[in-house]
Image: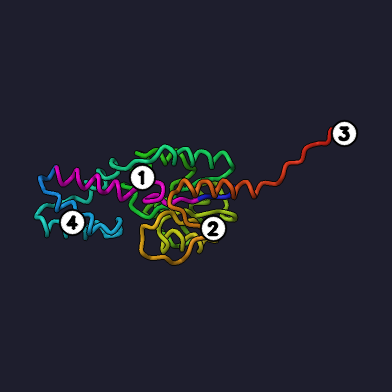
Amino acid sequence: MPLACFDLDNTLIDRDGAFLAWARWWVDRAGLGLTAVDWLLAHDNGGFTPRAELFAGFEEQFGVRISADDYDREHPGFTWVEPAVLDGLASLRTTGWRLAVVTNGGVVQQSRKLEHTGIADAVDYCCISEAVGVRKPDARIFEIAAAGAGAVLDGGWMVGDHPAYDIAGGIHAGLKTIRVGSHHAVDLPVADYQFESVLEAFSQLRASASALRPPTTGMSTEL
């Protein structure tokens, strides 16, 4: 069966929205003002700033320590998934796709996000870079995902928001690619398709599956 790979953050879920919700909650609990929220958002870099670096800078700026371990446990509780996304994943599975989440990140936080949102139960395999020891854009992470999902890479797709990780990784693995949104300034490499929503990507994958099916031939009723 062919494989459809999906990034997690800012693809299947609104990671930046969840980070904002966590930041507001944490800052309010710490008794700090909105300036602290603004600082976190300005320095988060969509999650790409290492947490140790982000939280050390925050402590230097505001004199309050954020525990990285607490963050890994707390932040996933602020994530959510749109029901239409879960419905879309279910629809793809009924059309013959094997589904895998392929995400860079730590096991604790990414696993909690996948379980909290229900995405873990909606796909065939979840491939987290820390768990498998390789990160996107390395093609090997897609080979691991394919094996875990019981699928093949031939005819498969990668859907994600980051050109340098998701799209480049998909291309390295020989997959067709779909970029979701425009969260990052980098525009290369260019995906086969670009949509604002992952829901549009679902439609493209369903159409692709239909095109691959052999036409059915009915038996003639003429005598």
- Give the Cα separation between the discs numbered 4 and 3: 76 Å
Q: Percent x, y for residue 190? A: 48, 64
Q: Is residue 21 magenta?
A: yes
Other-residue count near label 1 (Cα within 10 Å), few / some / many at <14 / 14–19 / ≥20: some
- Magenta region, residue range: 5-28
- Give the Cα separation between the discs numbered 2 and 1: 26 Å
| Sooner in the amino-acid sequence: mark 4 or mark 3 | 4
2 vs 4, front mark: 4
Count of labels shown? 4
Residue depicted at x 45% and y 48%: 198
| Sooner in the amino-acid sequence: mark 1 or mark 3 | 1
What residue did someone put label 3 on?
222
Q: Does the magenta stretch include residue 47?
A: no
What residue did someone put label 2 on?
176
Other-residue count near label 2 (Cα within 10 Å), few / some / many at <14 / 14–19 / ≥20: many
In the rendered image of this protein, does residue 104 appear above or below residue 114? below
Secondary structure type for disc 1: helix
| Sooner in the amino-acid sequence: mark 3 or mark 2 | 2
Q: In this view, does 23 lie to the left or right of 139?
A: left
